[in-house]
């Protein structure tokens, strides 16, 4: 008796695509479904009940592997994943790293329990992802590029967004512009720093390493960094923070130091989380499409599972959202 693999081979598709097509899944193009059904009929393929149930459990699920489940960024991302997964009839299983280890997550992939995976987790290194990706287990990585078979990418334009943010401050007349980055090994932080540096260079403004410090993408680390930025005797007249949570921590720190935003220091963040509209002053920030990042990652994965192997990396644009924290007119630099 012919097997599902036989049908897939004769139809020129993957086993997961053949399974989806024979279950009339709309993720597979109608012309492909017809071809697979015709091959199945010609081979006399009849699905085994137990095997079918096991296969359904696999192909109806995708893994979403994250470094952290906390914070407003991840909630919007997951909302996009869940909404698009529901539309496609798939279930998303969400997991995160535990104490910096990725073994449990990579085991989930290696044990062949899911049809594909979406990964936003720097703990899982490139070699691990490359080793588990296959035709039957495509992987979409978020905000990183991995040159390996069966690995695809969806990213936001972090460098371009940071360039917009810094250029906005330069256009307002600020020249002593500080940068508050996330962890130095963070891809996001590195790309946003590159955008910051490029904007300064293009405007003919010298880079000053004394105006740069790093946090952990958390509000508390932004609060602490606010004191460090104003402790070396040369104070920035504006700050670009690499995410909104750190920028909100900075607001609190600056207030405690008797500095007013934007009168004394202009401030711009990154992400456009919901809280940025409600802090005082409302935060100028770079909106990255967090919901779309999750939604597009799922859509890309479904296209791959439906037999479309001609998938290119996706780069989503960012948008500068101007509010009160960046000021209306430039001011003179603070002197220590």
Image: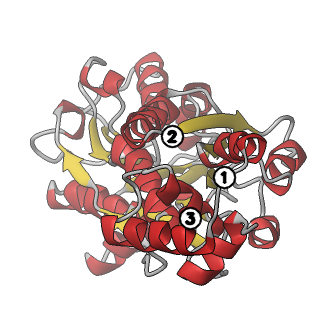
Q: How many angstroms separate mark 1 from mark 2 (CA)?
A: 21 Å
Q: Quadrant of the C terminus?
A: top left
Rounded to the nearest angstrom, the CA distance separating label 3 from label 2 is: 16 Å
Which residue matches tag 2? 90
Please indicate whether residue 9 sits to the left or right of residue 212 in the image. Answer: right
Q: Are marks 1 and 3 in contact (CB under 8 Å)?
A: no
Residue 18 is tagged as 3
> Residue shown at 70%/39% (left/top)?
53
In this view, the mark in front (3 or 2): 3
Residue 233, given in percent of the width and then of the height, sits at 53, 46
Please say if 334 is above or below 222.
below
Answer with mark 1 or mark 3, whichever residue precedes in sequence.
3
Q: In x, y percent, where is residue 104?
A: 87, 42
In whole angstroms, how far apart are the C-alphas of marks 1 and 3?
11 Å
Q: Is residue 56 above or below residue 319?
A: above
Q: Residue at 79%, 53% (x, y): give it.
A: 112
Q: Position of residue 79 (x, y in %)?
A: 42, 32
In the image, which disc is placed on residue 47?
Answer: 1
227 with respect to 125 (left or right): left
- Which of pointers 1 and 2 lies earlier in the amino acid sequence? 1
Q: Secondary structure at mark 3?
A: helix
Dot 2: what SS? loop
- Color theme of the render: secondary structure
Residue nearest the viewer, comparing 27 with 118: 27
């Amino acid at each position: 008796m012919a097997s599902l693999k036989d049908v897939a081979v004769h139809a020129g598709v993957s086993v997961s695509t053949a399974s989806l097509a024979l279950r009339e899944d709309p993720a597979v193009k109608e012309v492909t479904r017809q071809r697979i059904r015709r091959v199945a009929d010609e081979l006399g393929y009849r699905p085994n009940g137990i095997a079918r149930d096991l296969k359904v459990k696999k192909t109806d699920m995708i893994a979403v592997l994250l470094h952290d489940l906390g914070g407003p960024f991840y909630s919007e991302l997951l909302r996009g994943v869940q909404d698009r997964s529901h539309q496609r009839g798939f279930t998303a299983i969400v997991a995160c790293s535990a104490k910096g280890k990725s073994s449990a997550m990579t085991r989930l992939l290696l044990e062949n329990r899911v049809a594909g995976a979406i990964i936003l987790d720097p703990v899982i290194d490139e070699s691990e992802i490359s080793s588990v990706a296959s035709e039957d287990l495509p992987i979409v990585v978020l905000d990183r590029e991995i040159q390996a078979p069966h690995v695809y990418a969806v990213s936001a334009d972090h460098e371009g967004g940071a360039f917009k943010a810094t250029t906005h401050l330069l256009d307002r007349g600020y020249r002593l512009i500080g940068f508050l980055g996330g962890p130095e090994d963070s891809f996001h932080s590195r790309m946003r720093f590159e955008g910051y540096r490029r904007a300064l260079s293009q405007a003919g403004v010298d880079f000053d390493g004394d105006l740069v410090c790093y946090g952990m993408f958390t509000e508390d680390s932004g609060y602490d960094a606010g004191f460090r930025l104003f402790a070396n005797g040369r104070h920035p007249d504006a700050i670009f923070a690499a995410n909104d949570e750190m920028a909100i921590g900075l607001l609190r720190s600056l207030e405690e130091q008797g500095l007013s935003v934007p009168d004394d220091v202009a401030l711009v963040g990154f992400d456009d989380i919901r809280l940025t509209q409600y802090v005082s002053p409302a935060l100028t920030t770079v909106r990255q499409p967090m919901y779309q990042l999750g939604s597009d990652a799922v859509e890309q994965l479904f296209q791959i599972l439906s037999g479309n192997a001609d998938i290119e990396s996706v780069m989503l644009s960012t948008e500068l959202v101007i509010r009160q924290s960046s000021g209306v007119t430039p001011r003179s630099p603070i002197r220590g």
